[in-house]
Image (cartoon, rainbow, N blue to C red):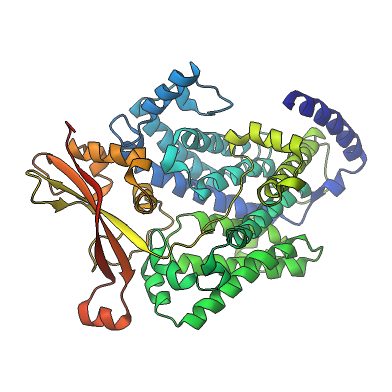
Amino acid sequence: MLTKFINVTANRFRILILFLNNKKESAVTYDFFYGRYLFLKFLAIIYFVAFGSLFLQIDGLYSSTGITPIIDYIALIKNHFQDVPFLKFPTIFAWFNSDFFINSIGLLGILLSIIAFFYIGSWPILALLWLLYLSFTSVGQAFLSFQWDILLLEVGFLALFLCSFDIRKQCHDQPVNRWVIWAFRILLFRLMFGSGVVKLFSGDPTWLSFTALTYHYYTQPLPHIGGWIMHQLPNWLHRLSVFIMFVIELLFPWLILVPFSFARKVCFYGIVLLMAMIILTGNYCFFNFLTISLCIFLLKDSDLAFFSWFKNRVPIKSGPLKNRSLYLIGLPCLISAVIILLGLNLELARFYPTLSLRHISSISTQIMSFRIVNTYGLFANMTTQRYEIEISGSFDGKHWEPYQFKYKPNDTTSFPGWVQPYHPRLDWQMWFAALGHYKHNDWYIKLLVRLLHNESSVLNLLQTNPFQQKPPTYIRATRYRYQFTTVKQFLDTGEFWVKDYKGLYSPPITLTK
């Protein structure tokens, strides 16, 4: 199937090249120099944040003494497949997976993102960043399975076609391919529209009754003080907020497809406003910042040129398309068109399976491991209760001392802090673990075992260790229900949270049992 698709595509590619021989100028635009420059700056910063926050947690999550060692996962894959099939697990860690190498790749990602910020539009640099992040996500298991991780990979892959394929040059002196711009716009459409549709298709009563935000601010994974403030607002305002959110997620994306720049500018301001409100009320790492960067593709240079200081910083050389290789025009057109088709078919397969194209769906399945085209949609079902897991250790099984986490709620007086764009991956996964049974999370059992060993790399992910001298004999976890306090309760007690004991989450365990 894939071979047939490649042959058919090659023939159509030749036709496209012949067409572009006479229509080179129509395939490109000279009105996105500033937009490309700004977006690639944004992308470099987001790569820096992604690799930087991951690097700070690599030892505790993925080293040989971490919670989910990459070397163990590679061994498991080899045991199952007799090798590490690259098409299923595209990662350089299949060949090199020592602790030193894993840390070196994290550090290399940081350095490359800094270079990408100052050396705009270098194809080799962005290709390496994409490959390195793909390598981590392919073996990252539960801690690298978030929607912003796969979104960064999809965005990072498309960004390659904004760059100069000449490694000696940056991209300032070449126009931008229109098909690539539309591939980004369709991605933004799928991201926003899909986020709205999943809420309706889930049948969740809180979304359908417009009451979801009366729960959201205190039940979201990592609230901050902005969420506590918003939670105090009256219910009618929460209902109005849900209505506005649905308008932006379900209606505004259609403005992307309207052939008028004014409509896309309205869409730009609507989506940016929604992302800004999410940033101001919750910690979602770099997800909202990455979404805002996609909104740049809704603008033209004329929309950005009024920032005179910005205009003077962009070293562009606009002019007619010279004797540039047609393949450097046709290849981005072809790849962008294929990605647009795969993405739209993926959405059809998700919401209207009978309308999707079977052969295209088969291709999507074969390239799924590369995270080039993905589906999105957060909070399809709103959680109406917040549960927190408190892990405690003991020497005698009677007197228990709790471990404190850095970012998730611990003590009721703990200030809901601002964490984003940093991504504390263990704290996030603890929120998911609290929603289910501990036996459904292999990484959770491994976490407890590491604590029984007083493993320093894992303890560095926590705020406190009550067992500095020697490790505990027993480890257990209890579960509490948390809810924001009212303003009056806060003024009376100084507490941001009210918590109720809900019993054991996992029973006491020792290294022998």
**Total numbered labels placed on residues in the image:** 0
Q: Does residue 20 show up? A: yes
What residue is drawn where x is 40% and y is 37%?
Answer: 107
Residue at x 45%, y 26% (from the top left corner): 93
Q: Is residue 65 left or right of residue 511?
A: right
Query: Is residue 173 visible from the viewing direction of this image?
Result: no
Name which quarter of the figure residue 124 lies in.
top right
Q: Residue furthest right?
A: 22
* Residue in the foreground of this view, choosing between 300 and 10: 10
x and y percent of residue 239 in the render? 53, 77
How far from the left and from the top, in percent, is residue 232? 39, 79
Task: Tell me residue 375's x, y (percent).
Answer: 61, 48
Say which quarter of the image contains residue 479.
bottom left
In the picture, measured across the screen, residue 323 lies left or right of residue 186, that is right
Residues 182 and 105: in front is 182
Quadrant into which the N terminus falls: top right
Furthest toward the top, the residue is 82
Q: In which quadrant will I find the C terminus? A: top left
Residue drawn at x 31%, y 42% as measured from the top left: 444
Residue drawn where x is 66% and y is 65% of the image? 250
440 vs 271, left or right, is left
- Percent from the top left, x then y, of residue 16? 87, 36
